[in-house]
Amino acid sequence: MDRERVLSWTKAERLGLADFLDDLEGADWETPSLCTGWTMHDVVAHLTLSTRTTLPGMVKGMVRARGDWERMEFDAARRRAADFGPAELIAQFRETAASTRRAPLSAPLDPLVDVLVHGQDIARPLGRVRPTPHEQTIAALEHVLASPFYGARKRLRGVRLVATDANWSRGEGQDEVRGPAGDLLLLATGRAAGLTGVSGPGAERLGRVL
């Protein structure tokens, strides 16, 4: 995948999400997101960290969290949410939309996955629609399925994914799941909310593990 193309996609999605966040009202920021235990404020704080996290800071965070990656991420987001209000976080997110920096150990496509998925983590619980562009979503989905970081291989073992809004499918299992690429991306990253837009025998199976 061409690096400049991925950077362009990521910048556009970040700016689009920043504009989306501008429309959120006060109470929206304390609404639970799709990330269990995370408010919208926490998620946006987390998004601003992807271009600001350093290797020494990550190591320190892992020590504090006793090696628990998810706890480290949650604690870092909570601390930043406590330090900055919504308007400040949106400004920070917009300012670094074109940044080439990414968190230590992450791949070039991870920031794109981050903004696409967290955009849905925010929009869906609020009953709002944030469309996911097909080409970018398919690229993100391919990356998630190939990366060991997201746990998709284990989660989707024996399941064949088929996009209904793009000429794309992956997997050789007998349990097929059909739906928009955006919903398949949510399933691949462990979000049960993706089940609302899919069908097929594999959907019931995923519903038991997500």
Image: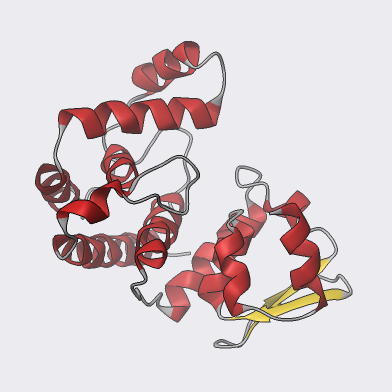
Q: Is residue 127 above or below residue 48?
A: below
The image shows a total of numbered marks equal to: 0
Q: Residue 46 is drawn in which quadrant?
A: top left
Q: Is residue 79 left or right of residue 75?
A: left
Q: Is residue 156 left or right of residue 100?
A: right
- The residue shown at (25%, 56%) is 28
Q: Is residue 105 above or below residue 118?
A: above
- Residue 14 in percent (x, y) is at 26, 60
- Residue 81 in percent (x, y) is at 24, 34
- The residue shown at (36%, 57%) is 115
- Residue 43 in percent (x, y) is at 34, 45
- Residue 164 in percent (x, y) is at 61, 87
Q: Residue reaching furthest right? A: 174
Screen quadrant of the C terminus:
bottom right
Q: Is residue 18 left or right of residue 167?
A: left
Q: Is residue 179 above or below residue 89?
A: below
- The residue shown at (20%, 63%) is 15
- The residue shown at (77%, 50%) is 154
Q: Residue reaching furthest front? A: 27
Q: Residue 158 is drawn in which quadrant?
A: bottom right
Q: Nearer the viewer, residue 5 or 125?
A: 125
Question: In the rendered view, how is the structure colored?
Answer: secondary structure
Q: Residue 55 is drawn in which quadrant?
A: top left
Q: Is residue 121 left or right of residue 10?
A: right
